[in-house]
Image (cartoon, rainbow, N blue to C red):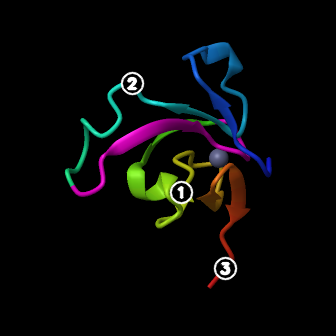
Amino acid sequence: MVAELNILSEWIPEQMGPGTLFVLENAGDIGEKEDPYWAVLSCPSCGTLGLITRKQMAGLLPVICGSRECSAQFFINDSNIVPRKPS
Ligand SMILES: [Zn+2]
């Protein structure tokens, strides 16, 4: 798993390698009012793209990879990726 986020300021799909984050242009406008979608994140382990919410971005909720073949769970802490400790 990559340990640091790579933040893109422009949407360049070819550069969305594992651990790359792109903040949505309409961040906060879609999804739940309480916790709207905020960014696209490429799983730091397998590179699968997924949407993350504002609370996940703030490190309040863990991010769980959407791929069936990957069980990555982690928190975002500023620009670091912190694996979630098994409880
Ligand atoms: Zn993954």
Q: Which amino acid type is marked by label 3?
A: Pro
Numbered label attached to residue 63: 1
From the viewer's perspective, is the residue at label 2 or at label 1 nearer? Answer: 2
Residue 39: within the magenta?
yes
Q: Which amino acid type is marked by label 2?
A: Glu
The residue where tag 2 is placed is: 25
What percent of the width, then of the height, locates residue 87?
A: 62, 85
Residue situated in front as seen by the camera: 38 or 49:
38
User: Which portion, as a residue range, is magenta?
Assistant: 34-47
Image quadrant of residue 16?
top right
The residue where tag 3 is placed is: 86
Tell whether label 3 touches label 1 (CB within 8 Å): no
Image quadrant of residue 27?
top left
Q: Secondary structure at mark 2?
A: loop
Residue at image point 23% right, 57% down: 34
Q: Which amino acid type is marked by label 1?
A: Val
- CA separation in Å, label 1 and label 3: 14 Å
Along the polypeptide, which appears first: circle 3 or circle 2? 2
Residue situated in front as seen by the camera: 67 or 10:
10
Along the polypeptide, which appears first: circle 1 or circle 3? 1
